[in-house]
Image: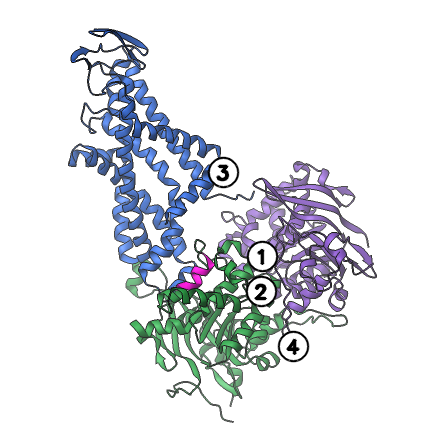
Chain colours: A blue, B green, C purple
Amino acid sequence: MSIESWIEILRISLRSRNKTFLTGFILMMFAISLAIIGVYLTPYDPTKSYVVIDGKRFDIQPLLPPGSKMIVETSSGNITLIFYLGTDQLGRDVLSRVVAGARFVLLVAFIATALSSLIGIILGLISGYAGGLTDRIISLVMDAMYAFPGLILAIAVAALIGVGIINMALAIAVVYIPSYFRMMRGVVLSIKSLSYIDAVRLMGAGSFRILFRHLLPNALYSVIAVLPINFADAIITEAGLSFLGLGIPPPTPDWGFDLNRGQKFFVSGYWWIGAFPGLMIIITVLGFLLLGEGLNDILNPRRSVR
Amino acid sequence: MSHVTYTNNDQRSQDDLVVVKNLKVYYRLASSFIESLVGRESFIKAVDDVDLIIKSGETLCLVGESGSGKTTLGKAILRLVEITDGKIFFKGEDIHLFKGEKLKLFRRKAQMIFQDPYTSLDPRMRIGDQIKEPLEIHEIGSRDERREIVYKILQKVGLTPPEEFYYRYPHQLSGGQRQRAAIARALVTGPELIVADEPVANLDVSARAQIINLMKDLRKEMRLSYLVITHDFSVAWELCDRIAVMYLGKIVEEGPVREVFERPLHPYTQALISAIPKIRVRGEKFEAKKIRVIGEIPSSKEIPRGCRFHPRCLYTMNICKTSEPSLIEVEKDHKVACHLYNIR
Amino acid sequence: MKTLLEIKDLKVIYEMGDKAVEAVSGANLNVRKGEVLGLVGESGSGKTTLGLSVIRLLPYNAKIISGEIVFEGEDLLKYDEKDMKKIRGRRIAMIFQDPFSSLNPVSRIKDHFIELFRSHYKNISYEEIIKRSRELLKLVEVPSDKLDSYPHQLSGGQRQRIAIALAIALEPDLIIADEPTSSLDVLVEAQVMELFRELKRSRDISMIFITHNMALVSEIADRIAVMYAGKIVEIADAEEIFINPMHPYTQALMASVPEVGVYKKLRAIPGEPPSLMNPPRGCRFHPRCSYVMDICRSIEPTLKKVGDHYVACHLYK
């Protein structure tokens, strides 16, 4: 599908006045901007628990509540350090960690979604079109994968291949391949028997043309709307993996990881350490979910009769 | 009284475009493991031993109700479905031996128009691009030439101005216009045979006449042969030279259209023709006694023994229950498969 | 003959997004007791919407915005849903094109009858329902052992016959049949039409028979109304309308329909059916009419009595 079609979809969606979509779009843009430019805006280094001013190192006090200020004496005078969202148990600025965390989380989710959709869609195309034994075998494997609860499967794969951004993305991707496969295969099966496919076959077209020029574009529309929803799911899975310690190793900022750490301190009253990363997860996931729902309404409108 | 049988005539006469011999298309139904072990699988005999000839330049109609096998036969002739047995010849050559270039040539010479104009066009492609596609596949003409060819053909089917219709999508066209686009697509490679599967059934009444007239004009202009598949007798009446009536996978009667309508020989044909709704005008008494048949069409899974029409026929004799009648020429050019005409 | 149903100036719209499409634009129509009125038109003519309006089974995005539907003296449009429920099945019944629509795939045939009878007669006994169901099945020539079958076990023709049996079960005053034979094979269609004729003879039912097939409607209708783009353009006796069609659309329609056994030059109606979102000004048929005059382009003709016909056309003053 060409770039023009994507732009066209975006244009129609933005103009549609579909509240779900627009809300989701705004939230999503918020998260994405955070991911892209956020790192340049972090007031403090999210991995360090001290600041260096004029060559002198000042340790940041841990467990400061949101809005706290710290005054340091430097050679140039007294500088006030503000921690809008407080500091965590190691003295790192929570705001910086939240902002920087966006980058990694979204990167992992993006790679995972891209991988799983690509593999799932192509497999679904081939399987649906080929039918017969090929279809049976691939479907069997996919069903087996699908039978596993997502997080468990991701954990199993992550445990196998180890941690790191790419590995995490792979582990999560594996979880979602079957969904794309099923969806694509289903649509291909229903389109395959329509007469325009017969017509193209009658023209003497080869399988390649039928698959990629006719089946894929028509089937894609049903699948596209699910991408954002899947993205949201990937974020949660990523957070889950990090939460369990199977994610990106510290001190790299990561929402799920921070949520885990923060959980322990919640009871003692230091709520901000886990709450803000958790809030970001909710906002981002919600954003993508709404985006996906809205997109689905726009692209696949249901004209109900009664 | 002699009758001529048409089967086993290996000499193709000069103008036989399509020759079908002993064609069988059976579909195996999913059966349980035990059933397949014991060999008791059930088949749907969509086409059950059919002979047919379509001559160059003529229009033959395959007429029948659901389950008659007419669509399957039409698709088999284009090698769109796999056949179980028998042979199909296009211009003297066995189409199942076609490979590579020969197959591509066949695809240029024999095309199809489908029943539903709403699904026979790719909804995501522009009309012009779809009509151009066969030219791309067969590498006919240069880029610019192809566009010209498409414009010309759009003009021929009445989608004018062609420059405008080229860029439209199917959903922007009416049913009649879509069917015209489908016809354009079928014609663009210069075929000799067009199989039209219920070409007007899904169209509005006012579009039907347009398409029927278009098909007639094109036939003359482009020297086409048509195989028209329909359940609607009025369409057959308008378009066809010859008509073959099918029932449960077999041809039961065949002959020139006027002849078959005025003097139907097979009891099934007689019933069908008397059942056609006709506009009654003042004074015309409504025939209280329409020729009826008993019951409804049985499932293709359980085709009756002997003559497959016998359980519903008002003239059943003993022989009908055990022996299948063959298609025999009873009058000039008029064939029928019925024991009533075999008593010699 | 007594008038059973009187439709006056009915207007029905469909809401599509933020636009509204007028599917029926001011229809005036009568059905007399004991007659079969044929309602003929192509898709988009509004004939199905008209039929559904009478029995109030319109889709959720359809709205009746004006007019009256007077049935045996009462304006049905003033009834609420509760009252309409009492009417449906009991006094007005409907037969749909797709027999599967009328039948519940997970209920046996006898359950359909039980539900029907019980919803209108609280105290009727099971035995009584079965007895009546058997009689009805006999009437429509379906073997009575089919009462225990599920719809998918029956053939298309049988399903439609059962739909007819259900429609006449409570002896309604009016039956609306919307393309009742379109999905049936030719022979079965003939049998079902014969059944309709038999019911007409023996039970004197009143019916609105909706179809696009002129030949078919001529086999059963006493009077025929022709619709185009949401408007009724001609009403006349069945015999009359075929010999002497007055409205140009009716004439064009007849000239464009192929008829078995008739040698005629098929004359297609030029142009395309109008978009209901943006119907032509004045007479809706004028862009395609061979007799178009200036007045047709600006003023809509109203349905007027001309001789034995009602015609909506400026040609007749």
Label 1, label 2: how far apart the Cα atoms are = 10 Å
**What's the distance in space between the residues labelled 4 and 1, CA to CA?**
34 Å
Q: What is the CA distance from the residue labelled 4 to the residue labelled 3?
A: 54 Å
Report in which chain the residue with disc 1 lies. C
Q: Chain of mark 2?
A: C
- In this rendering, does residue C219 appear at all? no
> Residue B158: horizontal and vertical position, in percent?
55, 66
Circle 2 is placed at which residue position? C188
Three-letter code for the amino acid on which mark 3 is drawn: Ser
- What label does residue C263 carry, if any? 4
Hey, what amino acid is under mark 2? Val
Amino acid type at mark 4: Tyr
Magenta residues? B126-133
Subunit under mark 4:
C
Check if mark 4's residue and mark 2's residue have beta carbons within 8 Å.
no
Q: Which residue is mark 1?
A: C160
Q: Secondary structure at mark 4?
A: loop
Q: Earlier in the sequence, mark 4 or mark 1?
A: 1
